[in-house]
Image: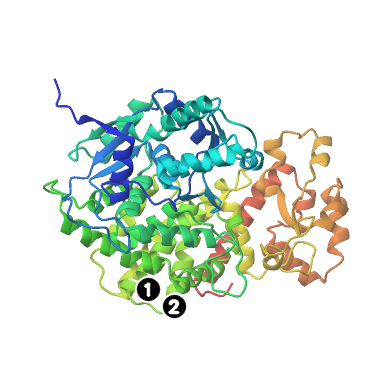
Amino acid sequence: MSTTVFKKVDYPLSKLIDDIDMGVIGLPELQRPFVWPNINVRDMFDSMYKGFPVGYLLFWENGLTDHHRQIGTGKKQKAPSLLIVDGQQRLTSLFAVLKGMRIIRKDFREEHLYIAFRPVDHKFEVTDAAIHRDPEFIPDISQIWAVPFLRFLKNFFQRLRKSREISEEEENRLSDTIYQLHDLKSYPFTALEISSSVDEEQVSEVFVRINGKGTRLNQADFILTLMSVFWDDGRKELEDFCRKAKTPATGEASPFNYFLQPDPDQLLRVSVGLGFSRARLNYVYTILRGKDLETGELSDERRERQFALLKESQEYVLNLQNWHEFLKTLLQAGYCSGKMISSKVGLLYAYTFFLIGKRDYRLDIPTLRNIIARWFFMTALTGRYSDSPESRMEQDLARLREIHDGAGFINVLNRIVTDRFTEDYWNITLPNELATQAARSPSLFAYYAALNLLDARVLFSNLKVEKLLDPAIRANKSALERHHLFPKNYLAKLGIDDTRTTNQIANYALAEWSDNIGISDKSPAEYFPEYAARFLPEEFQQMCYWHALPDGWENMDYQEFLEARRKAMAHVIRDGFSRLQGKIV
């Protein structure tokens, strides 16, 4: 028989609340977004009141000594010896109600968990305005534990007598009922405490088997929980940055942008890459627990050193100057909004390299922007981090371990870019990748980025592509539309009506909304000469280059046109990238 990796421990509710309050049990701060609806909280108290079970709790022994306190300004008296793996929403609800503390919802709105109780029929409700006014209800059961019990009873009956008479018998019966509610502090919970010798992968498997769920615990959640219990301020800083990044600010510096509204775990990945040169979060979880990778031993001192390193890196990641300098780099690469980016992971990894280049190799901003703009263009176009992103990033970071100066950093990234952008890639691979109808194709977005880099104008227009792709421009109709060069209804008349064929990205060009409407279902041979007449011959020749229109395309067979245009689009993308290398096209 295998050794049991857990022990069963029984807790009265009062002991759980006290241990959380002291910091022995690591319940993340109530400032963390709370996802349970209030009705779930009501139902849990109702079940407890009726003596029903409300499920096991799953804790993980920390393995650290109990004399170390939290990092930062946390008010807990001890570092936690137990981390919560399953049961966090239940314990957050119980702690918030019994302590009368506010929680914060996912939209960062503060809220008090008002749960009401009607002693006359033992009924729990989520408090609303009517219940607040009804003297039959205790509108906020938190008050039962907030003031001396006899005083609470006195106040309740004084309010109730103002609305109706109460007999001595009824008062005694209601008093017993309210005392039963007050005595929920003795409600028994059973916790399974997993040994500190068990790693996070095994803990995740235990969670799955207990809950019968098919999804393992998220590695980022493990680390964010550690941050909550050891470094409250660190997690709050992450969440505050992410909250502000979602909303335009007026009159103050802000992380808001049109590329990415990050989640805390996404920025955590950047901090991990910058601080530890690692991309795999399971490794980071191990070192932040203070575990030696060779011996497996846990150390308080090692944990504190690792958190100090994380704290230093996170401060750099959340620096608004660094953040916005990086976002300018995306603009320099031709990408002007999140709608043009198919991989947020690739964006975050580019930010990691940007920060490494700035902090560790002390590159000046113009030089750094140039290399990271080329790097991002390559990774975005090729989908470098689409498959096994952590493994790929580990490999890329490993290439820097023997690099000691800025020139070496630039050479490493340039070598990777050059090795990827071969002649075969430009002439064979990329045209083949353009043979798709996917609306969010990396190659299509790279083509748009190239048009920006080449300062291209919209098809049949004097307006710049870059201006009309600006995410700040909003109207009832999009400023730009993807115009079918061979209109769908025209193709249908030719017997071509398969959506995968008609919606090939090689059949799309960026046109103003009004022009797209005007062209309607006309054949290319009909509308193209009409619109060409708007421009001088040399102007229109330049426009045909930008929009990858082969000579005589309007009279081509459709399949022949698609093949020719894919090659022309690949050529434009290559020319756009060449602009990033400082070459004149």
- Give the quadrant of residue 266: bottom left
Which is more toward the observer, 80 or 582? 80
Vertical arrangement, residue 214 with respect to residue 361, above or below: above
Q: Is 223 placed left or right of 501 in the picture?
A: left
Of labels 1 and 2, earlier in sequence is 1
- Give the quadrant of residue 58: top left
Q: Is 45 placed left or right of 448 in the picture?
A: left
Badge 2 crowding class, 10 Å Cα cut-off, few under 14, some 14 to 19, many 20 or more, is some
Q: Which residue is drawn at 64% across and 64% down?
A: 451
Could you say where residue 41 lies in the image, as x and y percent from the top left?
49, 36
Could you say where residue 504 lies in the image, as x and y percent from the top left?
67, 44
Q: Which mark is residue 358?
A: 1
Badge 1 crowding class, 10 Å Cα cut-off, few under 14, some 14 to 19, many 20 or more, is some
Instruction: Determine the secondary structure under disc 2.
Output: helix
> Which residue bears the numbered disc 2?
365
Instruction: Determine the secondary structure under disc 1.
Output: helix
Mark 1 and 2 residues: CB-CB less than 8 Å, in contact? Answer: yes
